[in-house]
Image: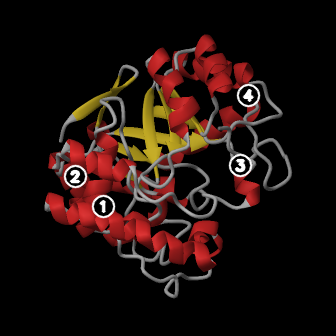
Amino acid sequence: MQHVKLGDLDVSRIGLGTMGMSYAYTDSGTDEEESIRTIHRALELGVTFLDTAEIYGPYTNEELLGRALKGRREEVVLATKFGFLSHTGRPSGQLDSSPASVRTAVEGSLKRLGTDHIDLYYQHRVDPQVPIEDTVGTLAELITEGKIRHIGLSEAGPETIRRAHAIHPIAAVQTEYSLWTRNPEARVLPVLRELNIGFVPYSPLGHGFLTGKVRSTDAFGDTDWRKNNPRFTGENFQRNLRIADEVQAVADQAGATPAQVALAWLLAQGDDFAPIPGTKRVARVEENTAADAVTLTPGQIEQLNNLTPASGETHGEFELGLLER
């Protein structure tokens, strides 16, 4: 597995997002043994970059990683996130990146993960009630105390990124980015390149859609967040199937799977990208990591650049309100 730098943090250029092992998708949290086997297989294949968050569960995903990494902590760069849960008494559903909440959050994550430090600690969403300078100042103190090593932001816009980076270097920004979600290209990516901040695309396979295996939503359980996602419902879903077909056509040319093509396209965008495809299955992590060896031709990249635009927003109205773009 090749490696890239997020700021000065060295990671495998394909990571592993673990959210779906515990949260948000059909059958999440139903097979812990398979999830742990998937994590261990990822490590065998050279993946060093694992991503979780306290909200996943909540809490249970961090606990799962803590169990999976027992005795193997030093093999990985461990990233987790705070901010969706309030530890200072704010009403449920309100973001909280106040210094007091951050300090409580980090202690909980350290305990659940079974470690004395977090390699990359992200603000999960920008809290409009707390100046980013206050939040990053607290994170800088945690670095001095040895509890975290690097600071990250998730779904932050250019102005927030600049203000945060002026207080303490930001190692990485995590944002949804894939062949069908390219919003960061216009405003966010130029700022990251200017400031030497790494980019971590989450949902690089479009929540499974770009694998070509989702041809119907009938199997989605009631707890699967895609069940009410605009891109997976009604006429939008039917129109978006054309995108999956177009990716499949390039995959046939490349002798790879659609998932590998979608990841290879991301990796071709620069040596400061480290996508974190999520899965809870060993076979899928084997497929995804093999994208490290897939090289697309300029013509294939051009085909992918010109895919049919996706129909529907990436999130519902409430979730969209939490994104800075």
Residue picked out by circle 3: 85
Which mark sits nearer the N-terminus, 3 or 1? 3
Q: Circle 4 sits in a helix, a strand or a loop, which is it? A: helix
Q: Nearer the viewer, residue 199 or 296?
A: 296
Within 10 angstroms of label 1, few (less than 14), some, or many (20 or more) residues?
many
| Image depth: mark 2 or mark 4 in front | 2
Circle 2 crowding by C-alpha within 10 Å: few under 14, some 14–19, many from 20: many
Q: Is residue 166 above or below residue 236?
A: above
In front: mark 3 or mark 1?
1
Residue placed most toward the observer, 259 or 282: 259
Measuring 61% from the left and 54% from the top, which residue is drawn there?
55
Q: Which residue is mark 4?
A: 99
Asked if labels 2 and 1 touch by Cβ distance under 8 angstroms, the answer is yes
Q: Is residue 277 above or below residue 106?
A: below
Which residue is found at the position 58% from the left and 30% from the top? 187
Quadrant where the C terminus is found in the figure: top right
Residue reaching furthest to the top: 166
Residue to which mark 2 is pinned: 291
Q: Please report whichever mark, 1 or 2, sits nearer to the chain's N-terminal start.
A: 1
> Label 2 amino acid?
Ala
Q: Please say if 162 is above or below 118.
A: above
Circle 3 or circle 2, nearest the eye: 2
Label 1 sits on residue: 259
Q: CA distance from mark 3 to mark 1?
A: 32 Å
For marks 3 and 2 on the same chain, the one whose residue lies earlier in the sequence: 3
